[in-house]
Amino acid sequence: MQGVANMILGRSDEPALPDQGFAGSRPLISVENVGKTFQTASGERIEALEDVNFTVADGEFISIVGASGCGKSTLLRMIAGLGKASRGRLLISGKTILGPSADVGVVFQNATLLPWLTLRENVRLPLRVGSFRVDASGKVQDLLSMVGLSTFANAYPYELSGGMQQRAAICRALVRDPKVLILDEPFGALDALTREHMNLEMQKIWLSSRKTVLMLTHSISEAIFLGDRVIVMSPRPGRIILDQRIDVPRPRNFQDTVGHPEYLRLTREVRTLLMKGSSV
Ligand SMILES: Nc1ncnc2c1ncn2[C@@H]1O[C@H](COP(=O)(O)OP(=O)(O)OP(=O)(O)O)[C@@H](O)[C@H]1O
Ligand SMILES: [Mg+2]
């Protein structure tokens, strides 16, 4: 929980390593030969991830899909600085990730807003620690406007729908202007219609904020609707079995996108891969 609290508050307890000296075109995120082995309380070894390699360019939207338990959250937690790799290394802007930092904002499946704070106070929370003690009421209001919640700034979480709470959680993750936004099943708890609406909202947020996004989802259609690339992982130990560019024009809408030949082809390919994996 401490790690999650640190992430929400954007605390970094450890300094970043010096720049690794990559060339100008270096990726924003590099995951190199990463593996993760957990040791359970009973002493059993769980091989969660094996030999994971990929890079992410600044501004890309990456969707990650894979069977439950294949190590997706473990991987994104490491990119968020909330867990350490057993093997390999992870870098942001050429620097080894050593702990949570203001470079990365995270949104979890449930909005995790604090019930005793208003929306405005919840979104402002990461700015109220350490050197970030600044009056950012303008910034908070801009973010709430971007997601259509400006008139709800003084409302409490219980007064909002699930989709509204999730939009507020995205604002909170963006308030310190991180380079990377990590979304771990952000719309999994929403009904199908609200989820489609949130997919359109998410595209709008990404197009206007131009953040680098890494999103985990169990929905193949959501992954391909939103992503520039889709990464498919094998069952545990998770490995990358497909890393594919999604060449469907933006901005995307459901009417045109779900009938686009590339969307249909990729949806079929990803579903086939996931079904093969689940029958192993
Ligand atoms: N702290 C831990 N200690 C021991 N095992 C762990 C720990 N965290 C995760 N695991 C194991 O690592 C594997 C991967 O877990 P992870 O949460 O990354 O999966 P996931 O792909 O995100 O699954 P889901 O789609 O269900 O969220 C699982 O087998 C899980 O039991
Ligand atoms: Mg998970």
Image: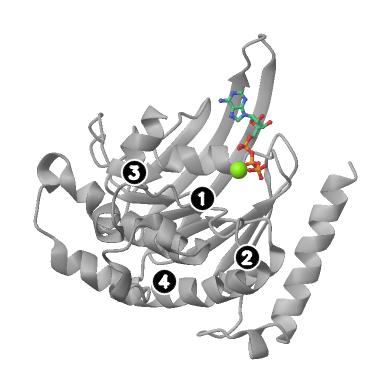
- The 10 Å Cα crowd at callout 3, few under 14, some 14 to 19, many 20 or more, is many
Ligand 1: which quarter? top right
Of the image marks 2 and 3, the number of the one nearer the N terminus: 3
Answer whether labels 1 and 4 touch (C-beta < 8 Å): no
Q: Secondary structure at mark 2?
A: helix
Looking at the image, residue 198 lies above or below residue 37: below
Residue at image x 69%, y 38%? 69
Residue topped by disc 4: 206
Q: Nearer the viewer, residue 143 or 79?
A: 143
Of the image marks 4 and 3, the number of the one nearer the N terminus: 3
Residue 155 place in picture, x, y as percent:
32, 63
Residue topped by disc 3: 8
Badge number at residue 223: 2
Type of amino acid under label 1: Asn
Q: Name the side, left or right, on which 86 lies relative to 46.
A: left
Q: Is mark 1 within 8 Å of ligand 2?
A: no
Of the image marks 2 and 1, the number of the one nearer the N terminus: 1
Q: Is mark 2 within 8 Å of ligand 1?
A: no
Residue 249 place in picture, x, y as percent:
56, 85
Residue 136 place in picture, x, y as percent:
14, 61
Q: Is residue 233 visible?
A: yes
Residue topped by disc 1: 110
Looking at the image, residue 60 lies above or below residue 17: below
Distance, label 2 to label 3, CA atoms, is 25 Å
